[in-house]
Amino acid sequence: MQLTAAMNANARGVHASVPPAANAEHPSVPAAGAIEVWDASSGVEQRLTGTDLARNADPVVATAIANARAVDAFFRTTFGRDGWDGQGAPMRIIVHAPNEDGTPNMNNAYWNRGQQRIFIGDGDGRVFDPLGGAFDVMVHEATHAIVDSSVHLRYSGQQGGINESWADVMGAVADPGDWLIGEDVFTPDVPGDAIRDLEHPSYTRLADLPSGPEVGPHELSALPSLAAVRVAEALGRGEMGRIWYRALVEHLDSRAGFAGAARATLDAAAELHGATSNQVGAVLDAWKSVGIDPRWKGARTDT
Ligand SMILES: [Zn+2]
């Protein structure tokens, strides 16, 4: 099972993008950042160096490293960001990360804020293949790191939903072609499904959201993510990504709920294109379509 899963991840999971020799779009940003990798397969974390880092013989590790490099390259070349903190911090991953109780085959990947590392489980081969095989999942976790370095958000309520949404949306900007998250590693025996489908969420308007503990950050994220999908439909996915990234790093503040997140994207669109631009109009329409009224004080007047 382990070997099969590993071979699957290796065969289909590696993202094709290779860091360019020079960053033409953002010449002040180094072409590639440092990667730090630990292998937890023995039960004890081993820091990888030399050949183990450059050409690891374990395909699960090699795939996760390749995708980590591609994630670093994505933020660098697309947004001119030098590492997750914007100041050259290395991307740090733990491969074959165990469950909290120490058992292997964790069906999860997560960003640990305290340790500033991304923990990547192997999956049990039924719910998940090794999660480092999914480029969009790796972008998702790296975006949580960027969120943490940009704004202090609680991981609950609408702020939890904002955090999860931005992580998914950046995953979909980096891995275009569909709006699925984690399709490369989720339920390997079930074709075509994914962890989340940003285009077809369970809830499509704010008024439809039940309140209660069963509605957590991953459910609440559906609304801002659907707004992002609709902006992409109007302006293109790359342009939406540009607005959404700028909103995160320049405008989102630690008091933001959904309306505040919407205002952050409107402020970003207005900076990039002008307050009366079509782009601002498209962003405003998208948020209103999911029942979120940003009550933006910008200059756009509805006609
Ligand atoms: Zn997440």
Image (cartoon, rainbow, N blue to C red):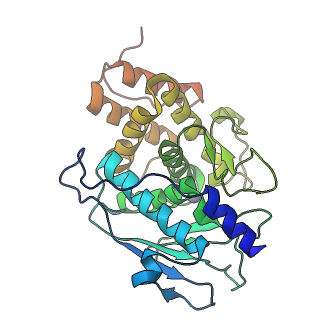
Q: Is residue 57 above or below residue 270?
A: below
Residue at the image point whose x is 44% and y is 41% from the top: 260
Please state if 268 lies on the left or on the right of 133 as rendered.
Answer: left
Which residue appears farthest toward the top when viewing the image?
Answer: 303
Q: Is residue 70 above or below residue 121?
A: above
Q: Please name whichever residue, 231 or 223, is drawn nearer the observer in this view of the structure.
A: 231
Measuring from the top left, give residue 131's x and y in whole percent: 63, 64
Q: Please name whichever residue, 43 or 277, is drawn nearer the observer in this view of the structure.
A: 43
Q: Quadrant of the N terminus?
A: bottom right
Please state if 63 lies on the left or on the right of 300 as rendered.
Answer: right
Which residue appears farthest toward the left when viewing the image?
Answer: 28
Measuring from the top left, give residue 227's x and y in whole percent: 54, 33
Residue at the image point whose x is 60% and y is 67% from the top: 109
Residue at the image point whose x is 42% and y is 35% from the top: 238
Residue 264 seen anywhere in this rendered image of the structure? no
Measuring from the top left, give residue 129's x and y in whole percent: 70, 64
Q: Please name whichever residue, 246 or 215, is drawn nearer the observer in this view of the structure.
A: 246
Residue 53 seen anywhere in this rendered image of the structure? yes
Q: Is residue 112 above or below residue 269?
A: below
Tally of numbered tags: 0
